Amino acid sequence: MNGKTFLTIGAISGFLSVAIGAFGAHGLKTKLTPEMLAVFETGVRYQMYHALVLFAVAWAMTRSYENLFALAGWLFVIGTVVFSGSLYILALTSTRIWGAITPAGGMLLLLGWLLFILGAFKL
């Protein structure tokens, strides 16, 4: 595996983050409560943060063969889908059970950051 995978996924995720954010700002502003709109915006913000970190993962993989970076990248990808995805669904449906899933995505993101830190120490 090389960094091209994470560069591509990061670019797609960044694109989707902008598109989803625009949809939320323009299409949902009058349809969601302020609380649910804030939940939706949190999902967009975290998706963009982790789209950008995937670029750092791709770069780090060019500097090292360390598998920690690849594992961190996959944790960022899966964590973003679970974290942001559950927030999007929660905001759109107001089904509170989705809020119970969000912390699992957050834990995956935290594990990704921990592995990224460990990989950086080994550079």
Image (spheres, grey):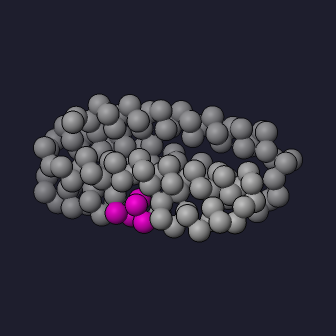
Give the number of marks. 0
Residue 110 falls within the magenta-colored stretch = yes
22 versus 34 height, above or below: above
Quadrant of the drawing holding the N terminus: top left
Q: Where residue 71 sits: x, y (%)?
A: 27, 51
| Closer-to-camera residue (76/51) | 76
Is residue 55 rendered to the left or right of residue 117?
A: right
Residue 28, horizontal then vertical, whole percent = 79, 45
Residue at 41% x, 47% y is 77
68 vs 52, nearest the viewer = 68
User: Could you tell whether 23 is left or right of 33 in the image?
Assistant: left
Q: Residue furthest right?
A: 30
Coordinates of residue 96 in the picture (x, y in percent)? 69, 66
Reply above or below: 117 against 73.
Answer: below
Residue 2 seen by the camera: yes
- Residue at image position (63%, 61%) is 98
Q: Is residue 6 above or below residue 122?
A: above
Magenta stretch? 107-111
Q: Is residue 93 magenta?
A: no
Q: What residue is shown at x 71% (from left), y 38% (from top)?
A: 23
**Above or below: residue 97 compared with residue 122:** below
Say whether residue 41 is visible.
no
**Left or right for 55, reference 45:** left
Q: Residue at x 75, y 59 (%)?
A: 94
| Residue 104 % position (x, y) | 47, 65
